[in-house]
Image (tube, rainbow, N blue to C red):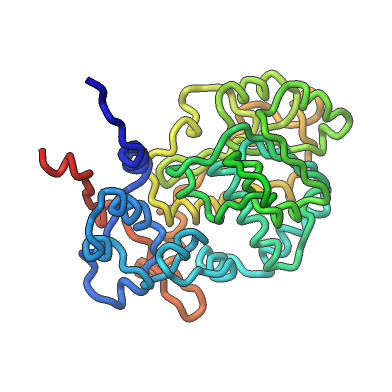
Amino acid sequence: MKKTIQINDIIFTKIDFRYHFMSKRRMRNDKQKAQTIVDSFYPAWIASNIAGQAPVVRNLITPRGVGYAISERVAYDLDTKKLHISELITMLGYTKTDIGKILQRVRNKRYDLILCGVGGSGSNFLHWAYEMMQWSGKDELFNKMTLYDDDDFDIPNMLRIPFIPKNTDSDIRSSLKVDTIPYKYDKIAMLTLRISRRLENNDLTNIGGRKKYTVIYGAPDIATREVLTASDCSFIAATHRDNTYSLVENPEVDNDLMMETYGKINLAKFFLNHLLMTIDFLTHLGEREHPFGRIDHGGQEENVTLKVSDFNEVTSRVTEKGFFKAGSKRLAVGDEVLRVTQILLPGDQNE
């Protein structure tokens, strides 16, 4: 007897594995709902649609048109106002002047950037660097930027992409990540190259005399990590798990590395964490005094932790009674412990 596999059931299971299902249904009043960043509730809204729940049930998870969104996709799907980069930066305790200085220091260094993967961490870096660049009036932060990725965007992963991916050419229908990154992000560097394969050893060899001005950044797979570890180039790993992120230079290939799992994602915290991680990475580049490359080339040694940050610890310093301040707005991020809800596929509901 052949078994029929429902594609939507597979998507549902992957979303359930990667994201917290959260609901607004226990919030006290409409004012509280209107002050909430709704990205945290988006995975549950998607899952409830896949499960075929009635509109009234989906509306209990997160009412459309209520609250504020960080992600372009969430704002569009939930018919919700999108927060501007200026509001997000203010929420996190920075000013426009602060950001302008950070970006200008990076521009002055004229680094080459190799982005190793443009999935969750890579796409968020591109988006937040571009948004801050546009807001502060800076452009071409890097001399050259090369994007490497051989993978496709899939539906569960796309939830954590803060922009709506687009094809680079109307005649091309591609799900490859490098083909669907919007052209506007090319402005991050004077020259941007997109390469639809993994970073290889020959790519590192061809850096040549620019090695001490070249930084490799991202969260690649183990095979690519091994290539990077065997090279004499500098690599900064951007890793995220649960509500914590880290930046580690020249990490060893180790099973304990945070990149191996994202944990369960609270989507609003995920986006804000990646904005903070982008700021921390750019701050390091601007303030860095020694060249890139391994220590025998005058650069950094292995396994150097540049930053470890926990979202809850950071926000405890910039929130007032649990609310962020963004101009006249008071905004809250839903707590995954308090707001978790259960969603079941129709077949599971009958068991």
Pick the residue in front: 274 or 71: 71
Pick the residue in front: 240 or 98: 240
Say left or right for 48 vs 179.
Answer: left
Identify which residue is drawn at 73% across, 21% down.
201
Q: Is residue 322 visible?
A: yes
Residue 245 at x, y = what percent? 50, 43
Say left or right for 13 vs 25.
Answer: right
Q: Residue furthest left?
A: 351
Q: Is residue 283 visible?
A: no
Residue 345 at x, y = what percent? 22, 44
Identify which residue is drawn at 53% across, 65% down.
88
Q: Quadrant of the N terminus?
A: top left
Identify which residue is drawn at 49% across, 59% down.
73
Tell me the quarter of the picture where residue 214 sits: top right
Q: Residue furthest bottom?
A: 328
Tell me the quarter of the picture where residue 250 sits: top right
Looking at the image, is 239 positioned above or below residue 139? Answer: above
Say left or right for 260 vs 227.
Answer: left
Pick the residue in front: 237 or 21: 21
